[in-house]
Amino acid sequence: MTIEFRVLGEIAVLVDGRPLTLGHARQRSVLAALLADVNRSLTLDQLVDRVWGERAPKSARDTLYGYLSRLRAALPAPVAIHRDRGYRLEVDPSTVDFHRFRGLVAAARSGETDQQIAELFESALELWRGDPFPDLDSQWSNEIRGALQHEYLAVKMDRVDCLLRLGRHNELLPQLAASASSSPLDERIAGQLMRALYRSGRRADALDVYRCTRERLTEELGTDPGNQLRELHRRILAADPALAANAVARTAHPVPRQLPAPPRVFTGRAEQLAVLDRVLDPAQQDGPTAVVSAIGGAGGVGKTSLALHWAYQNADRFPDGQLHVNLRGFDRSGVPELPARVLLGFLRALGVASEAIPADLDGRAALYRSLLSGKRMLVVLDNAHDTDQVEPLLPGSAGCAVLITSRSHLAGVLVRGASLLNLEVMPPDEAHDLLTRHLGAKRAAAEPDAVRELLRYCAGLPLAISIVATRAAAHPDFPLSPLVDELRDASARLDALDAGDLATDLRTVLSWSYQALPDEARRIFGLLGLTPTSEIGLDAAASLLELPPGKARVRLRALEDVHLLQQPAPGRYRMHDLVRLYAAERVVPAEDRAAALRRLVDYYLHTAHQADAMLNPHRRRSELAPPADGVVPPAIPDQRAAFRWFDAEHPQVLAAQDIAVDGGWDTQAWQLAWVLNGFHRRRGHLKEDRAVWRTGVAAADRAGETTPTMLAYSAAACSALAEHGAALAELSRGLAMAEQSGDLAAQANTHLALAIAWERKGDDERALIHSEQALRLQRAGGDHLREATTINSIGWFNAKLGRYSLARDYCQRALTLARERDEREEEANTLDSLGYIAAYSGHPEEALTYYQAARDLYRKLGHVAEEAEVLRFLGGTHRDLGNFHEAAAVWSEALAYYDTRHRSDQADQLRCQLAELPDGVALP
C-alpha cells in the first residue's frame, strides 16, 4: 500500500492513487497543520492557533477533539495520530509533498552536475498543484504559505540558472520573456533573460532588456539597477568569454562547492560590493598571480555575510569551484587553524587521497598551488588571524580569486598586492532597511520611534540587528516597546557601550537572546560551549547534555529558534564561532564541566569501539570501563554503518583524545588511539594514525598501562611513514616488556611487527627470521588468533627470497586457516601471496586465478590500496601471457588510482609498462 499526503495545492490523502474522504475544509486544515511537522508533538493550543488563529471560537478545543477523532478513523494503518504531551502524526516525511519538496531542493543544492541539479529542481517543482495549505487562514498558515511561495520562486529561478549553464538558453527564451513582462522590476529575471539572449546570439536584444529595465527602475522606484545587473551589462558590452554557455556548465569532475549557506536577509553594502566586483574580477587581471581582497572590520560587523553574498552572486565567474574555510583567527580557544591542517582539507576537497598528501606545510602548499594552476576558482578564507596563517593558502597563479575576512590588519598580505576593504558599521539608512526587511514594512512603520531606538542600541551592527529582529519575531503581536525597555537596562549593556568596543557590544547583543532562554536552555547553551569543534552530532550532544536523543533534539531546537545554533544537515548541529565564544563564557560549575566532558569522551570512545569491532571483527578488543551515566552510544550494525560514522565524526574523535589528555583521563586517551587504528588503516589516514599513537603511548606511559601490542600498533604507524628508527625503537621496547612478563602471545605479535618493519626497511632475511620466531611463540603459547597471518608472512618472505616451493606450502596452509576462520582480509592477503608465487615460479595461468580472486576480495572489503597493488601484478601476468589488451585494462585501472593519489613513482612505472606494450593495443 502506498500513501501520499498533499498540501501543495488541494489538501488530500491518496492511498494507492485513490483519494480518501477527509471531511470538510476545517477538518482538512487540522490534518495539514499536523503534516507541517510530522513526527513532532503539537499542543492543542498550537493546533488551535494554526487552524483558527486569532478568530478561534471558545469551543475550538472541543471541536478539535472531534476533528482528530474523525481523522484517526479516516486514515489507514500504519498512519497514526498519537497523543504524547500533544498530538503527533507519525508518517514518513517523504510521503508528504511539502517535506519531499524541501528534500529535493536540498539534494539539488548539493548535486554533483548541472544535469542532476536540474532534474532534482524539476522534480521538486512538479509537486506543486496550487497554493500551499489552501484551506487555512491563520497567521501561521499565511507565514508558512508565504515562505513556501518564496522558496518556490527561488527554485524556479535557480532552475533557470542551472539550465542556462547547461546551454539550454534557446528553449528558455519564451518563458523568460513572459516572466520579465510580468515582473519588469525583477533584476534577477532581467539578468537571466539577458544571458539567454546573449548566448542565443542576440546581443543587441540583451542590451535592450537592460535599457528597458533601467528605465522602469528609474521611473517607478527612482533607483538604478543593482551591482550584479550593471556588471552583467558591462560583461555583455565587453563580450566576456566567461558568459558563453560552454564556459560555465558544471561537470562530474571534482568541483568543490564549500560555501556555507548565504545570508537569509542581506541589504545595503552597495559600495563595498562594487569594490569587490572591481578588484576580484579574474577577467580583469593584469598580473601573473591570483587577485586577493581582504575585508577587515570588527566582530559582528558583517564581514562574513558580505563575503558570502558576493561569492554566491559571482559563483559563475569561477567554474572550477569554491573553497571555504573558517580559520578561527579569533576563537575562544585562542588557537587559530594551522595552515597545514587547512591545506589538508583543501587537498582532500580537490580529490587528493590522504596517503598522497605531503606531511609538511611547504609540500602541501606546493601541491595546492599546482592543483589550482590554470583553474578559475574562488577561495574564501574567513576569520583569518594574521599574514603567516594566510600566505600558504594563497594560490600562485592568475585565474583564481581570494576573499579574506579578518579582524586583523593583514599588513603582510597587503604589502604583497592585496586590496583592503575596511567594513564599518552600517550607515543609518542601511541599518533601518535591514531591520525593516526582518520585521516587515507594516510593523516597522507602525512604531517608528521604537525602531529608531532599537537601531540606536544596535549601533549599526548587522548581527545585533538580526538577533533583535528574531526576538521581536517570536511575538509578532507584541509591541516593540517592551523589547526597547529591556535593552535600556544598563546592567546588560551600558558597561560595554561605555567602552565603545564593538567586540563587547556583540557579547551584549548575544546576551539578549541568552537571557530570553529558559533556565534549562541556558544550561545547555553553556555546555555546548565546551565542545572542541564547531560541529556536533545529535547523539554526541545528547551524551554531553545527559539527555535521550529525542529530548536533546527538542532542547536544541530552542537554541535554533533564536539563531544561537544551526542545523546544516539532519542531526548535525553547528554553532558559529562568535556564538560559541560567548557560550564558553557562561559559567559552568567545575564539577558539571568535568562530568560533561567525560560524557563526551566516553560517547566517542564507546561508539568508536563498536565501529572498530565492525571493521576488525577478528582483532582483540580493548576492554573499556562502562560509560559515564547518561551516555548511550548508538548501535553500529554493520561495516557500512561503521565507515559512515567514522567518516562523519573523525575530527570530533581526534579532538576527544585531546580532551581526555587535558582532563587527565589517560586510559581513555590511549584507548581512543586503539579504536581509531583500524579506520585509519582502511582509509589511509597515516599521519593521523601516527599522531594519535604518539599521544596514546605517552598517555599509556603516564597511566602505567603500556603494552607490547600498543607499541606494535604505534610502530606500524611509524613504519607507514618510513620512520624506521622510531618503529624499531618502539618494537625493541615492546619486545623487552613482553619477554620480561613472559607473555608469549605479546612476544609473537611483536616479532610479527618486527618482520613488517624490517621488510619496509629492505631486509627480507631478517623479516623472515622474526616471522618464524613469531610462529614458534604462537604455538608454544597456544595462541591461534593470528596464526594465518604469521604463516602467510613466512610464505611471503620465502617467496621474496626465491624459495617458491616452500613459500607455496606455507601460503596454502595460511589460506586454509583463513577460510576456516572467516578471516576475509587475511584470505585476500594470502591469495595475493599465492599469485606472486605462481607468477614468479613459472605458472602464470595459476597466478591469474589467484590475483583475480585477491582483487575481488579486496574490492569487497574496501581495501583500495591493496587492490591497486594486485592490479599491478595482475597486469604483468597478463602481459607475460600475451594478453596485452587485458594488461592495458588492469594497468590503466591501477594508474587511475595512483594518479588520483599523486603517487608518482608507481604511476610513472605503470606508464612505462603501458608504453612498452605492442603497437595497436588500445588503451581504455
Image (cartoon, rainbow, N blue to C red):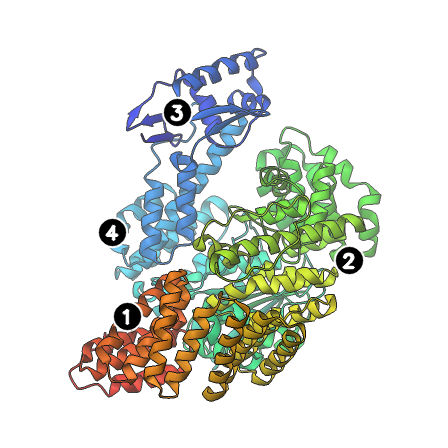
What residue does disc 2 label?
501
Mark 2 or 3, closer to the camera: 3
Cα distance in 3D space between marks 4 and 1: 50 Å
Q: Counting residues from the N terminus, which is met first, the one under dot 3 or under dot 1?
A: 3
Give residue 234's quadrant in the image.
bottom left
Q: Counting residues from the N terminus, which is met first, the one under dot 2 or under dot 3?
A: 3
Q: Counting residues from the N terminus, which is met first, the one under dot 2 or under dot 4?
A: 4
Q: Is residue 636 above or below residue 48?
A: below
Q: Is residue 466 visible?
A: no
Q: Is residue 753 visible?
A: yes
Residue lying furthest front: 780
Within-10-Å neighbours for mark 3: few <14, some 14–19, many 20+: few
Cα distance in 3D space between marks 4 and 3: 46 Å
Cα distance in 3D space between marks 2 and 4: 55 Å
Give residue 370's quadrant in the image.
bottom left
Q: Is residue 441 above or below residue 750?
A: above
Mark 3 or 1, closer to the camera: 1
Amino acid type, callout 3? Ala
Cα distance in 3D space between marks 2 and 1: 69 Å
Amino acid type, callout 4? Glu
What residue does disc 4 label?
171
Residue lying at 77% horizontally and 55% vertically, measured from the top left: 504
- Disc number placed over residue 77 in the picture, else none: 3
What residue does disc 1 label?
852
